[in-house]
Image (cartoon, grey):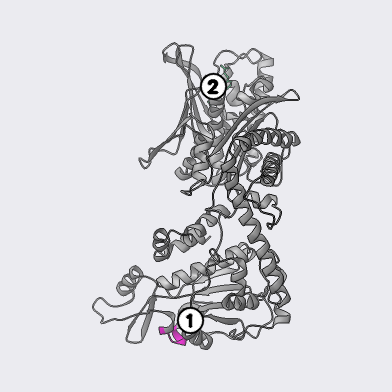
Amino acid sequence: MSDYRASSISVLKGLEGVRRRPAMYIGSTDVRGLHHLVWEVVDNAVDEHLAGIATEIRVRVLDDGGVEVADDGRGIPVELHPDEQRPAVEVALTTLHAGGKFDQQAYAVSGGLHGVGVSVVNALSTRTAVEVTRDGARHVITFSRGDLDQALERVGKAPKRAHGTTVTFWPDDEIFDTVEIDYDRIAQRLRETALLNAGLTCVLVDDRTGRSETLHFADGLKDFVTELLHGREPMVDVLTIHDQREVDGVPMALDLALTWTDGFHDERLRSYVNVVRTADGGTHEEGFRRAVTEVFKDASKTSRALTKKDPALVGDDLREGMVAVVSLKMADPQFEGQTKGRLGSSSARSYVQQVVGDHLRAWVRSNKSQVNKVVARAVLAARSRQAAKAARALTRRKGLLDSQSAGLPGKLADCTSRNPSETELYIVEGDSAGGSSKMARDRHTQAILPLRGKVLNVEKAQLRRVLKNTEIQALIKAIGCGVDPEFDYDKLRYDKIILMADADIDGGHITTLLLTFFFRLMRPLVDGGHLYLAQPPLYQLRHRGKVVYAMSEAEREVARRQEFRANANVDVQRFKGLGEMDAEQLWATTMDPNRRTLLQVGVPDAEIADELFDLLMGSSTAPRRDWIVDKAAFATNLDV
Ligand code: 0RA
């Protein structure tokens, strides 16, 4: 009796610790942490799939804010735990780190990859209900804030061979900043889960909205690579690798899919360890990259795609346009970095390098024409790398990248302040708008750089041509920091770089071109939050000396109703462009720091931005036009 008490007290202590310092167990108590609860249960269900049992995971968001996760795995054991003399499921839900996965080694590859604890979910939920189907019966047990509520009970019969677990929990609003479950977050994660686990079906249902989806990918990683291509044609058939072996007595497994496309200029590599994304890469990625470089460098020597005149290929050339997913499973992985997003285990490097090297060498031997395509693409990359290097050397000689020696561009109307923390550069489309903005500005802090006509499309043109373009040169000189990869943040001459273009299609286009320029060649400016979009109004409403501006048709109608008498004869002027506004109007609406609205340009996710610019600047025009016309998209996609 006293033993029982003693152990239950220590258990209680464990879960109290979770409630006292939840971030220790789930990272944070914001939306991310909240959804961690869902991942915790889903990952346990995925383990049942990896163990070869579960085929389906169903997540349901309930009307009352609860989340139900059901799987057809083995079912959490219900028999009495030999030491604790309580049902194993009760022990699993109330004991920290007791997933009940007793043998680490055996589970290392086939399952047991997660299982840190449904008990953490239990501790951080006002209520948790677990239903287990196994041994021919359905069993239910419930908890409240981690404490046992209703002891395990047999609630009905079940077919003899039926098995599975349903965990339903209601996140605790005493713990979390918000308990609002985000459908899209779960959908995205389940999609990833389904892509990484070929054959597993993931279902998501939202009772609050009626939304639902089913995710199932028969070809797993091959489908994943196809998704990452976003409609681009692969240059070679998607190549897949599956390997499973013991390395120094430790089981390892590698799944991989790989191809190349000429639709991207970067490398798109996604990696996972034990079905968890490694956003910062690590040793498995290193091993993979080394193998690709080694094998294809070798292959290029005997490929007719590489001629004597060509520069020697480097790894970056070979991996340009490469799209790949690497999924490694291993026991006891070591993670590094601030967010633990990088794999540090060195055994993974040599294992992946060896397996990928062996597979690729065999593939290269029997796919000569496909190899030629990959090498030809790398040769193009090597040539443009050389050209860009030559162009940079040239511009450096001319002093273009150094504003001090080159002097400022003639068209720049600079501000008088030399304190970069208070200065702003308005980049203005067209000379007439340039004129009125020069009159309107606060000349102490605001500088104006008018650009003529269309800026060169950085995405299509080669770097060499881009840097020769006079508009681009003026821009680089005025800003003062040079361009990637020699960008020098300390030389930034303005705190805010503000793009001010007409609120029409052409203005949208020019803004897009400039954004592309900044994103590709002055990325640190974007990341540092220095880039802004001005928001000139579309309409002016005036009646008896009262003037109101509106950004859109909808705003105009609201203003007409709310700002003026019902049947007032309001004079409405539509601005076709910035040039139609006089200095006073421009100042009042778009440039006065106290009255204007600026959109700060940000890049929420490098890959999303990359996609966006590919879409906008790539070859297909229809989607691009739609996007440009719908200028609101700038705000939603780029404004953070
Ligand atoms: C402990 C041991 C076993 C399975 C599980 C826990 C388990 C946990 C969860 C959480 C959600 N779904 C789950 N399914 C299973 C192994 C049981 C056995 O060997 O029979």
> Badge 1: few (under 14), some or many (20 or more) residues near its Cα, within 10 Å?
some
Is there any visible trace of residue 38 in the rendered image?
Answer: no
Judge depth for marks 1 and 2 and give the one in front: 1
Mark 1 to mark 2 CA distance (whole Å)? 65 Å
Q: Is mark 1 within 8 Å of ligand 1?
A: no
Q: Could you say where residue 71 lies in the image, as x and y percent from the top left?
A: 48, 26
Local SS, label 1: loop
| Mark earlier in primary sequence (1, 2) | 2
The picture places residue 394, in percent across and down from the top left corner, at: 70, 73
Q: Nearer the viewer, residue 468 or 76?
A: 468
How many numbered marks have been drawn onto this rendered protein structure? 2
User: Is 513 on the left or on the right of 253, as rendered?
Assistant: left
Q: What residue does disc 2 label?
A: 52
Q: Residue at x 46, y 82 (%)?
A: 586
Mark drawn on residue 289: none
For ligand 1, give the image quadrant.
Answer: top right
Q: What's drawn in magenta, residue-wise? A: 580-585
Per the image, the residue denoted by label 1 is 430
Could you tell me what secondary structure mostly forms the magenta stretch?
helix
- Residue 28 included in the magenta stretch of the image: no
Question: Under tag 2, what secondary structure?
Answer: loop
In this picture, residue 538 sits left or right of residue 105: left
